Image (tube, rainbow, N blue to C red):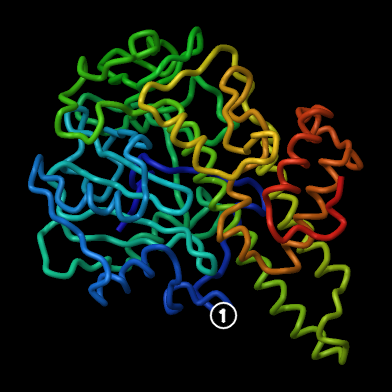
Amino acid sequence: MCWVIVCLAAFGVVGTGSASAQVNFEEAPINYNQASPANAISRFQKKLDAGEAKLTFDRKEGRGYLPAVLDALKIPVSSQVLVFSKTSLQVKRIDPLSPRALYYNDDLYLGFVQGGSVLEVSASDPELGTVFYTLSQFEASRPQFVRKTFECTQCHAGSMTQGVPGHIMRSVYPGPDGMPVFREGTYRSDHSSPFEERWGGWYVSGTHGKMRHMGNLIFRQGDSARNLNRDRGANADDLERWFNTDPYLTPYSDIVSLMVLEHQAKMHNLITRAQFEGRITDRDSLVMNRMLEREAAFQSDSTKRRYESSAKRLVDYMLFTDELQLEDQIQGISGFQAEFSKAGPRDSQGRSLRDFDLKRRLFKYPCSYLIYSESFESLPEPVLEVVYRQLWEVLTGKNQSKEYAHLSVEDRRAILEILIETRRGLPKYWKL
């Protein structure tokens, strides 16, 4: 099952060079298809099986288990974004009049299709990266989240997901039926993407001033990528002009939620990539040390370089290198901004990595909030050590490389202070 995007136009990322090379995750030490998941969904399923949790079936508007799952797993309704391009497994039920709804929190993603037979769910697993599930939309005495492997990884484990099981967020030129017009090309989205290339095939509610995107538009006969009139879909505070929003939990497809999703989807993929590479490097190092009769903990120069490479790719993205510089104010209207900001830890000055800027850039303090996630904490120790060292060198100003020039002295100091107060498990040398 192709979860969300390309096979679905929902989540998407792409790597370049070695970053996008395929990781052999079906063999040891990863064993992706055989290993037992340990994530928010697998833990919740155990509660369902034990009768410690229940899901109420909602017959209104065919919502089925959607409201109950969102509530049980603490996925905010305000995160709702809507995609109408035919890029999903349940493609026959998706079109501009019946978009698919996506919801997410820091660890989970959920897709809902009007009249669909299943909810599509994915979880960020600390050991396995993205793990895919479906939940039947037919009422049952004991609902079951069913894990999917090959059905999803055939689309969601390639160059567009950093070579690991992950998400793909894409922008397309959608025809009147929602089918992408592939001859015009497609775009992959993250926080560095040009604004004018974002959200083709998506609905977008909220304001963005003079900037223009591809959302809310149908690509009709006579249109081309060169003459697309982006003004028609700009600064939309009401999606009712395009489709009936009543069947959905909210009438919004929030622009700020879309921007956070773009960042988060790729960040999760990069965490998974670093997880897998770190474990494979550790395996290879142990083999070589055994062969050469060295201490098991010995790190060769080659091993160190592999850890450094995995860590730097992650650190660069965490610190929003190459982030698009906004040219106007972004403003959502669904309440997502306030709800998202409240969710994370704050330091003694009231600052959080979840505070928005939305005038020049996405976040006020450009360091990914997923540094607090279970998946980040579970990175292999050698990789995590290098990540912390590289972060420390940038935030203290020791590393003045040009890729970090977007971080002012004040930015670095603020991020450093926030992390020292709010991030547990930092190395002892992390002091002011």
Q: Secondary structure at mark 1?
A: loop
In this rendering, position of residue 422 left or right of residue 302 = left
Q: Position of residue 267 (x, y in %)?
A: 57, 47
In this rendering, position of residue 40 left or right of residue 352 = left
User: How busy is the neighbourhood of tag 1: few (under 14 within 10 Å), some, or many (20 plus)?
Assistant: few
Q: Position of residue 317 (x, y in %)?
A: 66, 43
Q: Is residue 351 above or below residue 28?
A: above
Q: Is residue 309 above or below residue 172?
A: below
Q: Residue furthest left?
A: 59
Q: Residue furthest front?
A: 348
In this rendering, position of residue 256 left or right of residue 311 = left
Disc 1: which residue: 28
Q: Position of residue 20 (x, y in %)?
A: 60, 52
Which part of the image, by quadrant, shows the N terminus? bottom left
Q: Residue furthest right?
A: 398
> Residue at the spot x=89%, y=38% of the render?
397
> Residue at the spot x=55%, y=74% of the render?
30
- Which of these two is toward me, 365 or 297? 365
> Residue at the spot x=20%, y=38% of the render?
94
Q: Position of residue 259 (x, y in %)?
A: 49, 31
Residue type pointed to by label 1: Ala
> Residue at the spot x=42%, y=55% of the render?
156
- Which of these two is toward me, 336 or 127? 336
Which image quadrant for residue 69? bottom left
Task: Give the total of numbered labels.
Answer: 1
In this rendering, position of residue 381 left or right of residue 9 = right
Which image quadrant for residue 127? bottom right
- Which of these two is toward me, 185 or 11? 11
Which part of the image, by quadrant, shows the C terminus? top right
